């Protein structure tokens, strides 16, 4: 690893070697800052390397923590008081919650397939896409997977949180909104032509609209009205009309 200070003419300095012995030449390493001078690096295989590197001082490395499979995405920092925590996905299809300073696993969720996106933070929860079509919702302090949603086709990108709802676009041409608390659909959603499908996850565009990049190089602007919870119906027994 290498650190380059932003001070004028300051020289860079080398840190710990991140690559595990025997790791493939094309593997990717990740570095996540988890404290003032504390960092975690992935080693291109099953390892998480904790190290401390204060400015203008030598770095010190702690023992590597080994996961059941190769790390497949950058660790995601879980904000909050107390010891630092991260979520890490691995190639066996599991997500582990690690806590410093020892970084031993506190909890693990078995997702039941290959993790193809995530984990990613949205509000107070975390999403993972499994086998491209299933969205799982995790909360760090809950032992079970909170909910699962299966899309009509492969999910595009990492669903964003817009107006308090998770917007899920898939390659079958469906765009739906999910309640993060329950995983249930809000509104009727959109069904597009299967010949023209989203090419990337939708993004919020101004107020009450989504911008959706499409597979033909165009983009759609969609109002959020079909992705909102339905208004409550009057109760005839109450006498309201």
Image (cartoon, rainbow, N blue to C red):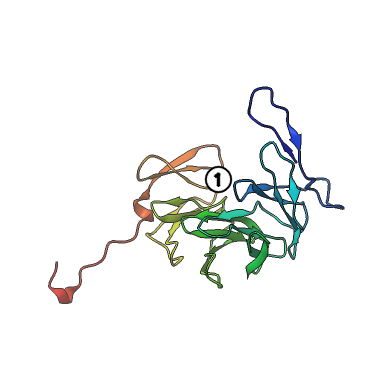
**Disc 1 element:** loop
As drawn, the residue found furthest toward the left would be 239
In the figure, residue 10 lies in which quadrant? top right
Q: How many numbered discs? A: 1
**Residue linked to disc 1:** 200
Residue found at x 24% / y 67%: 233
* Quadrant in the picture for the C terminus: bottom left
* Quadrant in the picture for the N terminus: top right
Q: Where's residue 125, x and y in %?
A: 50, 60
As drawn, the residue found furthest toward the front would be 57
Toward the viewer: 200 or 74? 74
Left or right for 240, reference 125: left
- Residue 221 seen by the camera: yes
- Residue 111 seen by the camera: no
Toward the viewer: 144 or 198? 144
Left or right for 188, reference 139: left
From the viewer's perspective, is residue 222 above or below residue 218? below
In the figure, residue 238 lies in which quadrant? bottom left
Residue found at x 65% / y 69%: 112
Residue found at x 38% / y 59%: 188
Q: Where's residue 59, x and y in %?
A: 74, 44
Residue found at x 60% / y 55%: 118
Left or right for 168, reference 17: left
As drawn, the residue found furthest toward the bottom would be 237
Toward the viewer: 106 or 241? 106
Left or right for 196, reference 75: left
Q: Where's residue 36, x and y in %?
A: 60, 46
**Would you call the spot at circle 1 few (<14 residues within 10 Å), some (14-19), or many (20 or more)?**
some
């Amino acid at each position: 690893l290498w650190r380059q200070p932003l001070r004028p003419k300051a020289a860079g300095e080398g840190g710990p070697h991140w690559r595990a012995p025997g790791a493939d030449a094309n593997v990717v390493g990740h570095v996540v800052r988890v404290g003032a001078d504390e960092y975690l690096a992935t080693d291109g295989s099953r390892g998480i390397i904790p190290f401390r590197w204060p400015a203008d001082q030598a770095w010190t490395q702690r023992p590597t923590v080994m996961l059941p499979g190769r790390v497949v995405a950058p660790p995601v920092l879980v904000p909050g008081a107390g010891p630092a925590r991260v979520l890490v996905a691995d190639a066996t299809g599991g997500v582990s919650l690690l806590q410093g300073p020892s970084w031993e696993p506190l909890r693990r969720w078995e997702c039941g397939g290959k993790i193809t996106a995530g984990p990613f933070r949205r509000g107070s929860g975390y999403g993972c896409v499994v086998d491209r079509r299933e969205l799982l919702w995790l909360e760090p302090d809950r032992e079970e997977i909170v909910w699962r949603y299966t899309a009509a086709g492969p999910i595009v990108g990492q669903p964003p949180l817009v107006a308090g709802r998770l917007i899920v676009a898939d390659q079958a041409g469906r765009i739906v909104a999910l309640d993060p608390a329950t995983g249930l659909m809000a509104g009727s959603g959109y069904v597009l032509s299967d010949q023209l499908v989203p090419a990337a996850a939708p993004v919020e565009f101004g107020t009450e609209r989504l911008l959706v990049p499409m597979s033909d190089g165009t983009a759609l602007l969609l109002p959020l009205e079909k992705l909102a919870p339905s208004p409550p119906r009057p109760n005839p027994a109450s006498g309201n009309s």
